[in-house]
């Protein structure tokens, strides 16, 4: 069945990032932007951290916006990595085990950043070698450290002209992968916290279920989705900018429905780090029918 893309009657953004991971805005700033854009449903899903959620939830309550906690976890699955979104009824639902593992992820990101800085300092032009310092990269971060923070420091030092050049010339080729939770571990802990695990951007170019360049073809997806569902997966992020651009929305909507999974969508809003204008937040062209399924799952 073809998914109709139209202007939604209620605007939402349930996949967005603040300065606590790799986004431009503070959690309160995202809420203000949402209010200005007429968005009434929000979830903050920073990478591998819950640190921005108290500010986010308090700001949303003051603004009269329906909001719930989220996170985007990088997980290991088979021989590649995926991004797993998880949505919770409230902060109190998140069990101590998951909180501890998320805190450990932050420590792993810091260890990885030390290694990545050392590697980049060896390959930049000679006059810049040793100029990148961990404490300066860390200063730009409110929460977990991510490559955009390193990219911003490289721009400040004059090593590159902009963040895109930092990634194109250095941060992709010389990246260091951290050891991630397995998908099955993450699914178990999210479900034990009463959370709703949703596979993020399954057809994007990176951290995706389908990636023809890596040999993961669309016809391989059903078998993998079946396995992930068996371990607790509840949804697929089907309506997504790259899926729209490449004509994959219908494929993923039909795949989700064939397994009884919740169909979600987002703009994956970061702001300036991904060259997104403020008006994009809340512009997902679908109705929030997923919300009834979320409420049912939360009881």
Image (cartoon, helix red, strand yellow):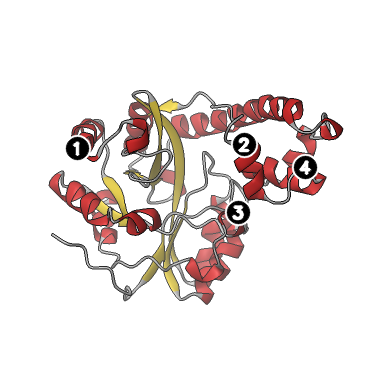
* CB within 8 Å, label 2 to label 3: no
Disc 1 versus disc 4: distance between alpha carbons? 43 Å
Residue bearing mark 4: 159
* CB within 8 Å, label 1 to label 4: no
Q: Is mark 4 on a helix, strand or loop?
A: loop
N-terminal of the two: label 2 or label 3? 2
Q: Is mark 3 on a helix, strand or loop?
A: helix
User: What residue is shown at x 68% (from left), y 43% (from top)?
Assistant: 151
Disc 4 versus disc 2: distance between alpha carbons? 13 Å
Callout 2 environment at 10 Å: few (<14), some (14 to 19), or many (20+)?
many
N-terminal of the two: label 3 or label 4? 4
Disc 2 versus disc 1: distance between alpha carbons? 31 Å
N-terminal of the two: label 1 or label 3? 1
Residue bearing mark 1: 219
Residue bearing mark 2: 171
Q: In which quarter of the image is residue 200?
A: top left
Please give left or right for residue 106 compared with residue 123 in the image: left
Check the image and report above or below for 35 versus 187. Answer: below
N-terminal of the two: label 4 or label 2? 4
Callout 3 environment at 10 Å: few (<14), some (14 to 19), or many (20+)?
some
- Confirm whether residue 145 shows in the render: no
User: What residue is shown at x 24% (from left), y 32% (from top)?
Assistant: 224
Q: Position of residue 205 (x, y in %)?
A: 41, 43
Disc 1 versus disc 3: distance between alpha carbons? 33 Å
Q: Nearer the viewer, mark 3 or mark 4?
A: 4
Q: What element carries label 2?
A: helix
N-terminal of the two: label 2 or label 1? 2
Disc 2 versus disc 3: distance between alpha carbons? 14 Å
Please give left or right for residue 38 compared with residue 144 in the image: left
Which residue is more in the foreground, 179 or 273? 273
Residue bearing mark 3: 273
């Amino acid at each position: 069945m073809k998914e109709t893309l139209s202007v939604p009657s209620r605007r939402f953004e349930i996949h967005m990032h603040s300065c606590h991971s790799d986004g431009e805005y503070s959690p309160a700033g995202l809420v203000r932007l949402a209010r200005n854009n007429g968005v009434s449903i929000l979830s903050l899903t920073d990478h591998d951290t819950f640190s921005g959620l108290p500010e986010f939830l308090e700001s949303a309550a003051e603004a009269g916006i329906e909001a719930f906690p989220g996170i985007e976890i990088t997980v290991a699955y088979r021989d590649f990595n995926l991004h797993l979104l998880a949505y919770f009824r409230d902060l109190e639902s998140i069990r101590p085990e998951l909180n501890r593992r998320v805190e450990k992820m932050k420590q792993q990101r810091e260890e990885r950043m030390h290694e990545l800085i050392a590697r980049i300092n060896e390959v930049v032009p000679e006059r810049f070698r040793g100029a990148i310092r961990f404490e300066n990269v860390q200063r730009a971060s409110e929460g977990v450290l991510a490559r955009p923070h390193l990219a911003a420091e490289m721009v400040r030092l004059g090593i590159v002209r902009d963040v895109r050049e930092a990634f194109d010339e250095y941060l992709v080729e010389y990246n260091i992968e951290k050891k991630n939770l397995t998908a099955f571990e993450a699914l178990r802990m999210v479900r034990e916290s009463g959370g709703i695990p949703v596979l993020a951007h399954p057809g994007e170019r990176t951290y995706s279920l389908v990636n023809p360049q890596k040999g993961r073809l669309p016809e391989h997806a059903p078998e993998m989705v079946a396995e992930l569902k068996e371990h607790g997966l509840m949804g697929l992020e089907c309506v997504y900018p790259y899926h729209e651009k490449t004509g994959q929305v219908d494929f993923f909507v039909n795949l989700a429905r064939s397994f009884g999974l919740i169909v979600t969508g987002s703009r994956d809003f970061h702001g300036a780090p991904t060259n997104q204008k403020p008006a994009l937040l809340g512009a997902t062209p679908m109705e929030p029918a997923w919300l009834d399924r979320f409420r049912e799952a939360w009881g």
